[in-house]
Image (spheres, rainbow, N blue to C red):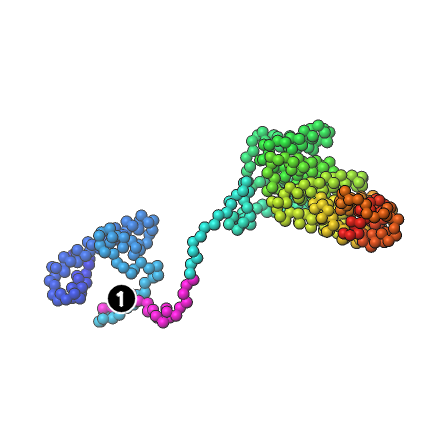
Amino acid sequence: MSVWNPDNIKDVAESVGIASVNDDTLQALSSDVEYRLSQVLEEALKFMRHSKRLLLSTQDIAQALRVLDVEPLYGYESTRPLRFGEASIGPGQPLFYVEDEEVDFEKLINAPLPKVPREMSFTAHWLAVEGVQPSIPQNPTTADSRNQELVPKGPGANQNLAAISGNDNVTVKPLVKHILSKELQLYFEKICSALLDEASDEYRVAALASIRSDPGLHQLVPYFVQFIAEKVTHNLKNLFVLTQMMQLTSAMLDNESLYVDPYVASIVPPILTCLVGRRLGSDQDQLAHYPLRNLAASLLGLVSRKYAKSSHTLKPRLARTCLKHFLDPTIPLGANYGAIIGLQAIGGPEVVRALILPNLKEYEVLIREPIEDDLPNKADAEMVVGALLGALRSLEEEGVSLTNGFVNGDSEEIRARLSAKVGELIGSRILGLGRPQLVKTVLSG
Protein backbone atom coordinates (compact mmCIF):
# COMPACT_ATOMS: atom_id res chain seq x y z
CA MET A 1 0.00 0.00 0.00
CA SER A 2 1.55 3.28 -1.09
CA VAL A 3 1.26 6.51 0.85
CA TRP A 4 1.07 8.44 -2.41
CA ASN A 5 -2.53 8.74 -3.64
CA PRO A 6 -3.01 6.83 -6.93
CA ASP A 7 -5.63 9.42 -7.97
CA ASN A 8 -2.81 11.91 -8.48
CA ILE A 9 -1.19 9.51 -10.96
CA LYS A 10 -4.52 9.14 -12.74
CA ASP A 11 -4.96 12.94 -12.99
CA VAL A 12 -1.50 13.34 -14.48
CA ALA A 13 -2.14 10.52 -16.98
CA GLU A 14 -5.39 12.13 -18.12
CA SER A 15 -3.63 15.50 -18.53
CA VAL A 16 -1.20 13.96 -21.04
CA GLY A 17 -3.91 12.08 -23.00
CA ILE A 18 -3.92 8.60 -21.38
CA ALA A 19 -7.59 7.93 -20.74
CA SER A 20 -7.56 4.57 -18.99
CA VAL A 21 -4.90 3.16 -16.63
CA ASN A 22 -5.53 -0.05 -14.69
CA ASP A 23 -5.22 -0.14 -10.91
CA ASP A 24 -2.04 -2.26 -10.80
CA THR A 25 -0.19 0.28 -12.95
CA LEU A 26 -1.41 3.16 -10.78
CA GLN A 27 -0.24 1.33 -7.64
CA ALA A 28 3.20 0.59 -9.11
CA LEU A 29 3.67 4.20 -10.25
CA SER A 30 2.59 5.52 -6.84
CA SER A 31 5.18 3.34 -5.09
CA ASP A 32 7.88 4.52 -7.50
CA VAL A 33 6.95 8.19 -6.99
CA GLU A 34 7.04 7.71 -3.22
CA TYR A 35 10.51 6.13 -3.47
CA ARG A 36 11.82 8.94 -5.70
CA LEU A 37 10.44 11.63 -3.37
CA SER A 38 12.00 10.03 -0.28
CA GLN A 39 15.32 9.77 -2.12
CA VAL A 40 15.25 13.48 -3.03
CA LEU A 41 14.28 14.44 0.52
CA GLU A 42 17.07 12.37 2.05
CA GLU A 43 19.66 14.07 -0.18
CA ALA A 44 18.15 17.50 0.54
CA LEU A 45 18.31 16.86 4.29
CA LYS A 46 22.01 16.11 3.94
CA PHE A 47 22.58 19.55 2.39
CA MET A 48 20.50 21.13 5.16
CA ARG A 49 22.52 19.46 7.95
CA HIS A 50 25.88 20.29 6.36
CA SER A 51 24.72 23.92 6.11
CA LYS A 52 24.05 23.94 9.86
CA ARG A 53 20.40 24.79 9.33
CA LEU A 54 17.16 23.44 10.77
CA LEU A 55 14.85 24.60 7.99
CA LEU A 56 14.73 22.85 4.61
CA SER A 57 14.85 25.27 1.68
CA THR A 58 14.15 25.05 -2.01
CA GLN A 59 17.85 25.43 -2.64
CA ASP A 60 18.48 22.17 -0.78
CA ILE A 61 15.93 20.43 -3.02
CA ALA A 62 17.59 21.85 -6.14
CA GLN A 63 21.04 20.66 -4.98
CA ALA A 64 19.62 17.19 -4.28
CA LEU A 65 18.15 17.01 -7.78
CA ARG A 66 21.51 17.91 -9.28
CA VAL A 67 23.23 15.19 -7.27
CA LEU A 68 20.67 12.64 -8.49
CA ASP A 69 21.26 13.77 -12.08
CA VAL A 70 17.76 15.19 -12.39
CA GLU A 71 17.04 18.53 -13.94
CA PRO A 72 16.33 20.90 -11.03
CA LEU A 73 13.27 23.06 -10.69
CA TYR A 74 13.44 26.67 -11.82
CA GLY A 75 11.81 29.77 -10.37
CA TYR A 76 11.55 28.80 -6.73
CA GLU A 77 14.76 30.20 -5.24
CA SER A 78 13.16 33.36 -3.87
CA THR A 79 13.62 34.96 -0.50
CA ARG A 80 10.07 36.25 -0.54
CA PRO A 81 7.30 33.98 0.79
CA LEU A 82 5.12 32.35 -1.85
CA ARG A 83 1.53 33.49 -2.13
CA PHE A 84 -0.91 30.66 -2.77
CA GLY A 85 -4.35 31.13 -4.28
CA GLU A 86 -7.30 28.75 -4.05
CA ALA A 87 -9.59 27.74 -6.93
CA SER A 88 -12.52 25.36 -6.82
CA ILE A 89 -12.83 22.87 -9.68
CA GLY A 90 -15.77 21.00 -8.20
CA PRO A 91 -17.54 20.13 -4.99
CA GLY A 92 -14.98 19.33 -2.32
CA GLN A 93 -12.01 19.58 -4.71
CA PRO A 94 -10.08 22.82 -4.01
CA LEU A 95 -7.04 23.58 -6.15
CA PHE A 96 -4.15 25.63 -4.80
CA TYR A 97 -1.81 27.54 -7.10
CA VAL A 98 1.01 30.07 -6.81
CA GLU A 99 -0.12 33.60 -7.61
CA ASP A 100 2.13 35.35 -10.10
CA GLU A 101 2.72 39.04 -9.52
CA GLU A 102 1.40 41.19 -12.31
CA VAL A 103 3.95 43.66 -13.68
CA ASP A 104 2.80 46.94 -15.22
CA PHE A 105 5.15 47.43 -18.19
CA GLU A 106 4.25 51.12 -18.48
CA LYS A 107 5.42 51.81 -14.92
CA LEU A 108 8.46 49.65 -15.47
CA ILE A 109 9.44 51.58 -18.62
CA ASN A 110 8.79 55.02 -17.09
CA ALA A 111 10.64 54.26 -13.84
CA PRO A 112 13.91 56.21 -13.39
CA LEU A 113 17.08 54.35 -14.16
CA PRO A 114 19.27 53.36 -11.21
CA LYS A 115 22.49 55.26 -10.59
CA VAL A 116 25.52 54.12 -12.52
CA PRO A 117 27.91 52.42 -10.10
CA ARG A 118 31.27 54.07 -9.60
CA GLU A 119 34.26 52.56 -11.29
CA MET A 120 36.61 50.57 -9.15
CA SER A 121 39.66 52.55 -8.07
CA PHE A 122 42.56 52.17 -5.69
CA THR A 123 44.28 54.73 -3.48
CA ALA A 124 47.39 54.41 -1.35
CA HIS A 125 47.89 55.90 2.10
CA TRP A 126 50.24 55.50 5.05
CA LEU A 127 49.04 53.31 7.89
CA ALA A 128 51.85 54.58 10.08
CA VAL A 129 54.95 56.75 9.72
CA GLU A 130 57.74 56.08 12.18
CA GLY A 131 55.24 54.26 14.38
CA VAL A 132 52.76 57.16 14.37
CA GLN A 133 49.38 56.86 12.65
CA PRO A 134 48.63 59.90 10.43
CA SER A 135 45.34 61.71 11.04
CA ILE A 136 43.67 61.06 7.67
CA PRO A 137 40.13 59.87 6.89
CA GLN A 138 41.33 56.43 5.78
CA ASN A 139 42.76 55.62 9.22
CA PRO A 140 40.65 55.07 12.34
CA THR A 141 40.73 57.89 14.85
CA THR A 142 40.71 57.93 18.62
CA ALA A 143 37.17 59.26 18.50
CA ASP A 144 35.78 55.89 17.45
CA SER A 145 33.10 54.53 19.70
CA ARG A 146 35.13 51.46 20.52
CA ASN A 147 37.97 53.54 21.85
CA GLN A 148 35.61 55.87 23.68
CA GLU A 149 34.38 52.94 25.72
CA LEU A 150 37.95 52.29 26.88
CA VAL A 151 38.60 55.86 28.01
CA PRO A 152 38.69 56.06 31.81
CA LYS A 153 35.83 58.02 33.30
CA GLY A 154 35.27 59.65 36.64
CA PRO A 155 36.83 62.44 38.70
CA GLY A 156 40.29 60.86 38.59
CA ALA A 157 40.41 60.08 34.88
CA ASN A 158 42.52 63.14 34.02
CA GLN A 159 45.46 63.34 36.41
CA ASN A 160 46.17 67.00 35.68
CA LEU A 161 42.57 68.06 36.36
CA ALA A 162 42.52 65.86 39.45
CA ALA A 163 45.63 67.62 40.75
CA ILE A 164 44.09 71.06 40.17
CA SER A 165 40.93 70.04 42.01
CA GLY A 166 42.91 68.62 44.92
CA ASN A 167 42.45 64.92 44.14
CA ASP A 168 46.11 64.33 43.36
CA ASN A 169 46.19 61.03 45.23
CA VAL A 170 43.97 59.28 42.71
CA THR A 171 45.82 56.62 40.72
CA VAL A 172 44.61 55.59 37.27
CA LYS A 173 45.50 52.17 35.93
CA PRO A 174 46.88 52.46 32.38
CA LEU A 175 44.82 50.80 29.67
CA VAL A 176 47.79 49.68 27.59
CA LYS A 177 50.69 47.73 29.02
CA HIS A 178 54.05 48.99 27.79
CA ILE A 179 56.88 46.52 27.82
CA LEU A 180 60.12 48.05 29.09
CA SER A 181 63.25 46.18 29.98
CA LYS A 182 64.36 46.23 33.59
CA GLU A 183 67.40 48.24 32.57
CA LEU A 184 65.28 51.00 31.04
CA GLN A 185 62.96 51.03 34.03
CA LEU A 186 65.92 51.38 36.38
CA TYR A 187 67.45 54.07 34.16
CA PHE A 188 64.20 56.06 34.15
CA GLU A 189 63.91 55.88 37.94
CA LYS A 190 67.52 56.95 38.44
CA ILE A 191 67.19 59.87 36.02
CA CYS A 192 64.00 61.12 37.68
CA SER A 193 65.46 60.89 41.18
CA ALA A 194 68.70 62.60 40.10
CA LEU A 195 66.87 65.51 38.46
CA LEU A 196 64.80 66.17 41.60
CA ASP A 197 67.77 65.93 43.97
CA GLU A 198 68.56 69.49 45.08
CA ALA A 199 71.61 68.40 47.12
CA SER A 200 73.66 66.98 44.25
CA ASP A 201 74.48 69.18 41.27
CA GLU A 202 76.82 66.51 39.91
CA TYR A 203 74.04 63.94 39.55
CA ARG A 204 71.76 66.42 37.82
CA VAL A 205 74.43 67.44 35.32
CA ALA A 206 75.29 63.79 34.61
CA ALA A 207 71.61 62.88 34.14
CA LEU A 208 71.01 65.74 31.70
CA ALA A 209 74.21 64.92 29.81
CA SER A 210 73.09 61.31 29.47
CA ILE A 211 69.68 62.29 28.08
CA ARG A 212 71.29 64.78 25.71
CA SER A 213 73.65 62.21 24.16
CA ASP A 214 72.31 58.68 24.74
CA PRO A 215 70.97 57.19 21.44
CA GLY A 216 68.96 54.34 23.01
CA LEU A 217 66.15 56.23 24.77
CA HIS A 218 63.39 55.96 22.15
CA GLN A 219 61.09 53.90 24.37
CA LEU A 220 61.42 56.33 27.26
CA VAL A 221 60.39 59.47 25.35
CA PRO A 222 56.64 59.20 26.16
CA TYR A 223 57.48 58.48 29.79
CA PHE A 224 59.69 61.55 30.04
CA VAL A 225 56.99 63.66 28.38
CA GLN A 226 54.39 62.43 30.87
CA PHE A 227 56.82 62.96 33.75
CA ILE A 228 57.41 66.58 32.68
CA ALA A 229 53.67 67.29 32.38
CA GLU A 230 52.90 65.81 35.81
CA LYS A 231 55.71 67.61 37.63
CA VAL A 232 54.89 70.98 36.05
CA THR A 233 51.19 70.58 36.92
CA HIS A 234 51.84 69.54 40.54
CA ASN A 235 54.74 71.92 41.37
CA LEU A 236 53.81 75.40 40.16
CA LYS A 237 55.13 76.82 43.46
CA ASN A 238 58.48 75.04 43.23
CA LEU A 239 60.85 76.88 40.90
CA PHE A 240 63.55 74.23 41.27
CA VAL A 241 61.32 71.44 39.94
CA LEU A 242 60.00 73.64 37.13
CA THR A 243 63.53 74.59 36.11
CA GLN A 244 64.65 70.96 36.10
CA MET A 245 61.71 69.98 33.92
CA MET A 246 62.65 72.68 31.41
CA GLN A 247 66.25 71.44 31.51
CA LEU A 248 64.99 67.90 30.85
CA THR A 249 62.93 69.17 27.92
CA SER A 250 65.97 70.98 26.52
CA ALA A 251 68.09 67.83 26.82
CA MET A 252 65.48 65.77 24.95
CA LEU A 253 65.24 68.33 22.16
CA ASP A 254 69.03 68.46 21.85
CA ASN A 255 69.32 64.68 21.41
CA GLU A 256 69.44 64.14 17.65
CA SER A 257 68.81 60.41 18.05
CA LEU A 258 65.33 60.90 19.53
CA TYR A 259 62.28 61.27 17.28
CA VAL A 260 60.26 63.84 19.24
CA ASP A 261 57.95 65.04 16.45
CA PRO A 262 54.88 63.02 17.58
CA TYR A 263 55.20 64.45 21.10
CA VAL A 264 55.53 68.16 20.27
CA ALA A 265 51.86 68.75 21.08
CA SER A 266 52.48 67.30 24.57
CA ILE A 267 55.78 69.12 25.13
CA VAL A 268 54.50 72.61 24.34
CA PRO A 269 51.90 72.98 27.19
CA PRO A 270 54.46 72.61 30.05
CA ILE A 271 56.74 75.10 28.28
CA LEU A 272 53.90 77.60 27.92
CA THR A 273 52.98 77.08 31.57
CA CYS A 274 56.50 78.03 32.65
CA LEU A 275 56.50 80.95 30.20
CA VAL A 276 53.15 82.70 30.76
CA GLY A 277 51.97 81.16 34.04
CA ARG A 278 50.23 83.64 36.35
CA ARG A 279 51.92 82.58 39.57
CA LEU A 280 55.24 80.72 39.46
CA GLY A 281 57.24 80.07 42.61
CA SER A 282 56.68 81.50 46.07
CA ASP A 283 55.93 85.13 46.87
CA GLN A 284 59.12 85.60 48.89
CA ASP A 285 61.37 86.49 45.94
CA GLN A 286 59.48 88.66 43.47
CA LEU A 287 61.99 88.28 40.61
CA ALA A 288 63.02 84.64 41.07
CA HIS A 289 60.74 83.32 38.34
CA TYR A 290 62.17 85.43 35.50
CA PRO A 291 65.15 83.12 34.73
CA LEU A 292 62.64 80.26 34.40
CA ARG A 293 60.56 82.31 31.95
CA ASN A 294 63.71 83.13 29.95
CA LEU A 295 64.59 79.43 29.76
CA ALA A 296 61.04 78.56 28.67
CA ALA A 297 61.17 81.25 25.98
CA SER A 298 64.40 79.84 24.55
CA LEU A 299 62.83 76.36 24.47
CA LEU A 300 59.71 77.72 22.77
CA GLY A 301 61.88 79.35 20.10
CA LEU A 302 63.78 76.08 19.63
CA VAL A 303 60.55 74.11 19.21
CA SER A 304 59.10 76.62 16.74
CA ARG A 305 62.26 76.60 14.60
CA LYS A 306 62.90 72.86 14.72
CA TYR A 307 59.37 71.55 14.16
CA ALA A 308 57.71 74.29 12.11
CA LYS A 309 58.19 72.31 8.89
CA SER A 310 56.43 69.20 10.20
CA SER A 311 53.55 71.25 11.66
CA HIS A 312 52.63 74.30 9.60
CA THR A 313 50.20 75.60 12.23
CA LEU A 314 52.67 75.39 15.13
CA LYS A 315 54.09 78.92 14.88
CA PRO A 316 50.72 80.68 14.36
CA ARG A 317 49.20 78.85 17.33
CA LEU A 318 52.13 79.68 19.60
CA ALA A 319 52.15 83.31 18.48
CA ARG A 320 48.39 83.56 19.03
CA THR A 321 48.72 82.22 22.57
CA CYS A 322 51.55 84.59 23.48
CA LEU A 323 49.78 87.58 21.92
CA LYS A 324 46.65 86.79 23.95
CA HIS A 325 48.66 86.87 27.20
CA PHE A 326 50.51 90.03 26.10
CA LEU A 327 47.31 92.01 25.49
CA ASP A 328 45.42 90.71 28.55
CA PRO A 329 45.38 93.52 31.16
CA THR A 330 44.04 91.23 33.91
CA ILE A 331 47.05 88.92 34.23
CA PRO A 332 50.20 89.73 36.25
CA LEU A 333 53.08 91.59 34.64
CA GLY A 334 55.26 88.48 34.92
CA ALA A 335 52.98 86.67 32.48
CA ASN A 336 53.14 89.71 30.16
CA TYR A 337 56.93 89.50 30.34
CA GLY A 338 56.84 85.84 29.33
CA ALA A 339 54.50 86.59 26.43
CA ILE A 340 56.81 89.33 25.11
CA ILE A 341 59.99 87.27 25.16
CA GLY A 342 57.99 84.32 23.83
CA LEU A 343 56.82 86.30 20.80
CA GLN A 344 60.38 87.43 20.13
CA ALA A 345 61.67 83.85 20.40
CA ILE A 346 58.98 82.46 18.09
CA GLY A 347 59.32 84.79 15.13
CA GLY A 348 62.16 87.22 15.78
CA PRO A 349 62.01 90.74 14.32
CA GLU A 350 59.09 89.94 12.02
CA VAL A 351 56.77 89.04 14.90
CA VAL A 352 58.02 92.01 16.96
CA ARG A 353 57.28 94.40 14.11
CA ALA A 354 53.86 92.88 13.36
CA LEU A 355 52.49 92.09 16.83
CA ILE A 356 54.38 93.97 19.54
CA LEU A 357 55.21 97.36 18.01
CA PRO A 358 51.63 98.27 16.94
CA ASN A 359 50.30 97.55 20.47
CA LEU A 360 53.01 99.30 22.48
CA LYS A 361 51.18 102.58 23.02
CA GLU A 362 48.09 100.90 24.47
CA TYR A 363 50.19 98.53 26.57
CA GLU A 364 52.43 101.32 27.88
CA VAL A 365 49.53 102.55 30.05
CA LEU A 366 49.65 99.31 32.10
CA ILE A 367 53.32 99.65 33.08
CA ARG A 368 53.56 103.44 33.43
CA GLU A 369 51.48 103.60 36.61
CA PRO A 370 53.56 101.08 38.67
CA ILE A 371 56.82 102.80 37.66
CA GLU A 372 55.71 106.41 38.20
CA ASP A 373 53.76 105.75 41.43
CA ASP A 374 56.39 103.37 42.87
CA LEU A 375 53.89 100.55 43.39
CA PRO A 376 54.86 97.11 44.81
CA ASN A 377 54.99 95.64 41.30
CA LYS A 378 57.44 98.29 40.05
CA ALA A 379 60.21 95.69 39.73
CA ASP A 380 57.96 93.57 37.51
CA ALA A 381 57.14 96.61 35.39
CA GLU A 382 60.86 97.37 34.97
CA MET A 383 61.44 93.78 33.83
CA VAL A 384 58.66 94.17 31.26
CA VAL A 385 60.18 97.43 30.01
CA GLY A 386 63.54 95.69 29.65
CA ALA A 387 61.88 92.87 27.68
CA LEU A 388 60.18 95.40 25.38
CA LEU A 389 63.42 97.27 24.76
CA GLY A 390 65.19 93.98 24.06
CA ALA A 391 62.50 93.06 21.55
CA LEU A 392 62.75 96.46 19.87
CA ARG A 393 66.56 96.19 19.66
CA SER A 394 66.07 93.09 17.51
CA LEU A 395 64.54 95.40 14.89
CA GLU A 396 67.71 97.43 14.60
CA GLU A 397 69.65 96.52 11.50
CA GLU A 398 73.28 95.67 12.08
CA GLY A 399 76.09 97.24 10.15
CA VAL A 400 74.17 100.35 9.06
CA SER A 401 75.94 103.65 9.40
CA LEU A 402 74.30 106.45 11.37
CA THR A 403 72.43 108.74 9.02
CA ASN A 404 70.83 111.08 11.58
CA GLY A 405 72.68 113.33 13.98
CA PHE A 406 70.34 113.27 16.99
CA VAL A 407 71.50 111.43 20.09
CA ASN A 408 69.99 111.11 23.63
CA GLY A 409 66.75 112.78 22.63
CA ASP A 410 68.14 116.22 21.76
CA SER A 411 65.36 116.67 19.26
CA GLU A 412 61.95 117.44 20.73
CA GLU A 413 60.33 116.53 17.45
CA ILE A 414 61.78 113.02 17.64
CA ARG A 415 60.62 112.67 21.26
CA ALA A 416 57.10 113.73 20.34
CA ARG A 417 56.96 111.32 17.45
CA LEU A 418 58.19 108.46 19.63
CA SER A 419 55.64 109.29 22.33
CA ALA A 420 52.88 109.21 19.76
CA LYS A 421 54.18 105.94 18.38
CA VAL A 422 55.01 103.84 21.48
CA GLY A 423 54.03 105.99 24.46
CA GLU A 424 55.92 108.48 26.58
CA LEU A 425 57.63 105.98 28.89
CA ILE A 426 58.86 103.59 26.18
CA GLY A 427 59.80 106.53 23.93
CA SER A 428 62.00 108.12 26.59
CA ARG A 429 63.69 104.77 27.31
CA ILE A 430 64.42 104.29 23.60
CA LEU A 431 65.99 107.75 23.37
CA GLY A 432 68.01 106.97 26.50
CA LEU A 433 69.67 104.05 24.73
CA GLY A 434 71.42 106.43 22.33
CA ARG A 435 70.71 104.33 19.25
CA PRO A 436 69.67 106.57 16.35
CA GLN A 437 69.16 103.60 14.04
CA LEU A 438 66.77 102.01 16.57
CA VAL A 439 64.79 105.26 16.78
CA LYS A 440 64.57 105.42 13.04
CA THR A 441 63.46 101.78 12.81
CA VAL A 442 60.74 102.25 15.46
CA LEU A 443 59.40 105.39 13.80
CA SER A 444 59.29 103.76 10.40
CA GLY A 445 57.83 100.46 11.68
Residue type of the residue flagged with mark 1: Phe
Picture residue at 22% right of the left edge, 52% below the top: 69
Q: Which residue is drawn at 16% across and 65% down?
A: 16
Could you say which is closer to the camera, residue 399 or residue 15?
399
Residue 374: image location, x then y, percent = 87, 46
Residue occupying the point 16% across, 64% down = 13
Q: Is residue 375 visible?
A: no
Asked if the magenta segment contains residue 441, the reply would be no
Q: Quadrant of residue 178?
A: top right
Quarter of the image with the N terminus in it: bottom left
Asked whether the viewer can see residue 77, the reply is yes
**109 relative to 134 in the view: left or right:** left
Classify 10 Å Cα crowding around label 1: few (below 14), some (14-19), many (20 and above): few
The spot of residue 6 in percent (x, y) is: 17, 61
Position of residue 289 in the picture relative to residue 136 (left or right): right
Residue drawn at 32 percent across, 63 percent down = 82
Occupied quadrant, residue 282: top right
Range of residues picked out in magenta:
93-115
Instruction: Give the percent coordinates (x, y) of residue 328.
Output: 75, 52
Residue 105 part of the magenta-drawn span: yes
Which quarter of the picture shows residue 152? top right
31 lies left or right of 157: left
Rendered location of residue 245, percent (x, y): 69, 37
Residue 367 in the figure: left or right of residue 119: right
Reading the image, the residue beneath label 1 is: 96
Compared to residue 400, the image places residue 101 above or below, namely below
Label 1 residue SS: strand
